[in-house]
Amino acid sequence: MSISLSSLILLPIWISMAQIQQGGPDEKEKTTALKDLLSRIDLDELMKKDEPPLDFPDTLEGFEYAFNEKGQLRHIKTGEPFVFNYQEDLHRWNQKRYEALGEIITKYVYELLEKDCNLKKISIPVDATESEPKSFIFMSEDALTNPQKLMVLIHGSGVVRAGQWARRLIINEDLDSGTQIPFIKRAMDEGYGVIVLNPNENYIEVEKPKIHVQSSSDSSDEPAEKRERKDKVSKETKKRRDFYEKYRNPQREKEMMQLYIRENGSPEEHAIYVWDHFIAQSAAENVFFVAHSYGGLAFVELNCCNWVSSSEPLDTSVESMLPDCPRVSAACSTEM
């Protein structure tokens, strides 16, 4: 009979639970602590404690990939497309590798926006201090001065950033399919000023500071015997937690916290901020928006108005069952 690693790990816990439950009221804290541990155990992760280190290259060359003349991501030695399942049966590790490559591609696209599209990277908030979190957008030289037309591009939700439509398409298809670059180049060729929004860049991540909890025995007025018993339970609980955390999170990934960017803490806030500080200040007589997926909802937040078919007088408010932008009458009827 074979016994799995997870069975060997969990068996002592079940035995301990049975022993504790046979005890009196003083054992309730132990029961609660062990139940908490059990609820957080991921059996899939227990079996992955021997996965390779989550230590990935920080350049395309390090991954041994490059974009060819057609804008396709290919292995520099084999010429093959990107392979997700680099390590068989290690989905978590493969996903982390994919995400690391995605971050490199995001920076690569930023470089293309500046070098190939001649856009300027503009830091926001415009009045940000040196120490506060910042985001950025990209603009053409004439974005605010072009008197005729301005094009604004807004991508959707998820991991994509300025200049991208879909990371998956960039990796598995090509740059023309997954980035906004063809739109930007054509717009500039046809005389548009261009602004590229970055609505998913809402915060920066920093390592979460460790919190040192003061022992209850240092300041408690409880009897010494009770304090000692509670401290013993606490130490045993911590020991078990650390033991199982080793298997749940074998590589001790850093705990991160998010610091949100002022007035740009969501896609909607970002769209409104860029409108108020850039688009509304532009000289363009006509402003055109190209928005994908959730970018369309962010655009709707810009006090948009939808003129719909109605027999009511022009600009009369029209009720809608949908939670979109305000609807008003276009003073025309759909009846034949």
Image (cartoon, rainbow, N blue to C red):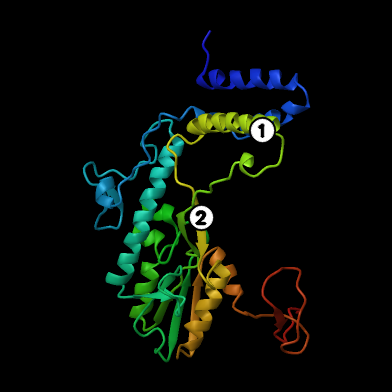
Answer above or below: position of 111 versus 124.
above
Q: Which residue is nearer to you in this view: 249 or 45?
A: 249
Answer above or below: position of 238 versus 221.
above
Taking the image as drawn, is residue 89 in sight?
yes
Q: Which residue is nearer to you in this view: 116 or 281?
A: 281
Taking the image as drawn, is residue 116 in sight?
no
Answer above or below: position of 294 versus 236.
below
Element on which disc 1 rests: helix
Find residue 127 and report its horizontal and vertical position in percent: 45, 80
| Residue, disc 1 | 230
173 lies left or right of 77:
right
328 lies left or right of 206:
right
Find residue 318 and report its horizontal and vertical position in percent: 76, 79
Residue type for callout 1: Lys
Residue type for callout 2: Met
Find residue 58 and report its horizontal and vertical position in percent: 30, 51
Quarter holding residue 161: bottom left
Q: Which residue is nearer to you in this view: 189 or 232?
A: 232
Q: CA distance from mark 1 to mark 2?
A: 31 Å
Residue sticking out furthest to the left: 77
Query: At x 72% / y 89%, what residue is drawn?
Result: 314
Find residue 163 and report its horizontal and vertical position in percent: 40, 66
Element on which disc 2 rests: strand
Nearer the observer: mark 1 or 2; the answer is 1
Closer to the N terminus: mark 1 or mark 2? Answer: 1
Label placed on residue 257: 2
Residue sticking out furthest to the top: 1
Q: Are there few (<14), some (14-19), or many (20+) residues within 10 Å of tag 1?
A: some
Label placed on residue 14: none
Point out the image quarter for the C terminus.
Answer: bottom right
106 lies left or right of 39:
left
Query: At x 45% / y 70%, what residue is drawn?
Result: 132
